[in-house]
Amino acid sequence: MKFSRAVIESIACVPAPIVWTSAEIEEQLAPLYERLKLPQGRLELMTGIRERRFWHPGTQPSQASALAGEAVLQKSSLPRESLGWLFHCAVSRDRLEPATAAYVHGALGLSPRTGFFDISNACLGFMNGLTSAAAMVDAGLVDSVLVVSGENGGPLVENTLRQLLDPALDRQSIKPFFANLTIGSGAVAAVVCRDDLAKHPVARLSAAAARIDTGANRLCEGHSAAADGLDMRTDSEALLEAGIALARATWDDFCAETGGNAATFARVICHQVGRRHQLRLYEALGLALDKDFSTFETCGNMGSVSLPYTLACALDENAARPGDAVALLGIGSGLSCQMTAIHIL
């Protein structure tokens, strides 16, 4: 898919306030480490994640999203009452009904004429929201869209720590829980609009390509129906291999759609899982590692927030500059992969 009129008018991210280091998590797992003779430092060594951040207990995803929404509206030159739609795109949600977007809409005081709905697609949700907004703008269906996401990974990590202290677990049975310890929290928001409405746009949305592999839809499954709270189980090895294979196929489509190649993009930003995934992906796609910009080291995997949050940080730190072509490489369990090209303005 190609875009002609849609721009990211503004983007803002909000870090969660509470820092948990990998060393502190391992301290809580000391009985497990001692019983299974696991080396201290294993978590950071295997993932490259030094720390991740969490919201204060009781914080709802909508509250986190609203913080980012307010931050981006403070940056935006568009009045909030002019927004056509609000998309809430997080894995995390306040409850099954109503849409979490309803709470964000109310918190931000948006117009009764601003529609809303949730977009849910695991870690790829925000990127799906971004391109959906761009497609609507290009089609003339709407002038502007506010895309938000607030992920609250704290309850999942806390429940995982309780689960891992079960004395019945052995080295094999702890593996499905390991990916949970990489999870962090954060929030991000962007305003997408028609280019003639933006006084100082951040980036132009250029093109995107997407592929799916639903044969891998059971490799990472999470739910909230467990008696003891949030639960997620991941076959990390199989998920990595399936994800790399899907990324290779999507990259070929992406290069065909954009007319580009590995040399085209000055900066590449991926979904933030950890060091091993980063290195394998860049090797598989033939990308130079010095084009990468990452936040997983201090933020962990923030689900749908990770990639756009990292883009916002790259812009704030001048790591993505005017004139740069940037490739946004997103993936979510299920599996689905979307790669999006933007040009910094």
Image: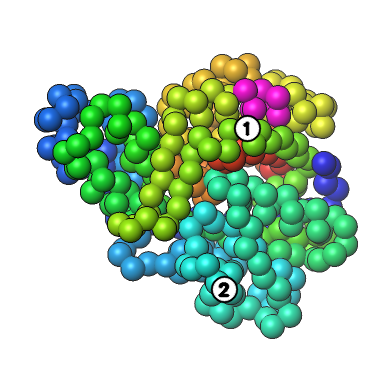
Picture residue at 52% right of the left edge, 50% below the top:
305
Residue 215 tag number: 1
Q: Nearer the viewer, residue 54 or 315?
A: 54
Q: CA distance from mark 1 to mark 2?
A: 31 Å
Residue 302 tag number: none
What residue would you read off at disc 2?
98
Magenta stretch holds residue 92:
no
Look at the numbered disc 1 and give the secondary structure of its residue.
helix
To which quarter of the image does residue 167 belong? Answer: top left
Q: Is residue 211 visible?
A: yes
Q: Nearer the viewer, residue 222 or 128?
A: 222
Q: Is 119 placed left or right of 256 in the picture?
A: left
Magenta stretch holds residue 249:
yes
Picture residue at 75% right of the left edge, 36% below the top:
209
Q: Nearer the viewer, residue 189 or 1?
A: 1
Q: Is residue 326 visible?
A: no
Look at the numbered disc 2 and give the secondary structure of its residue.
loop
Instruction: Name the colouring of the figure.
Output: rainbow
The residue type indicated by label 2 comes to: Pro
Q: Is 313 placed left or right of 214 in the picture?
A: left
Tell me which label, 1 or 2, sits earlier in the chain: 2
Q: Tell which residue pokes out farthest to the right in this image.
A: 140
Q: Is 67 located above or below residue 259 in the figure?
A: below
Task: Specify the quadrant that holds the N terminus.
Answer: top right
Frontmost of labels 1 and 2 is 1
- Residue 4 percent coordinates (x, y): 85, 48
Q: Tell which residue pokes out farthest to the bottom in this image.
A: 112
Q: Mark 1 packing: few (<14 Cα in 10 Å), some, or many (20+)? A: few
- Residue 203 percent coordinates (x, y): 70, 47
Which contiguous range is marked in magenta?
Answer: 245-251
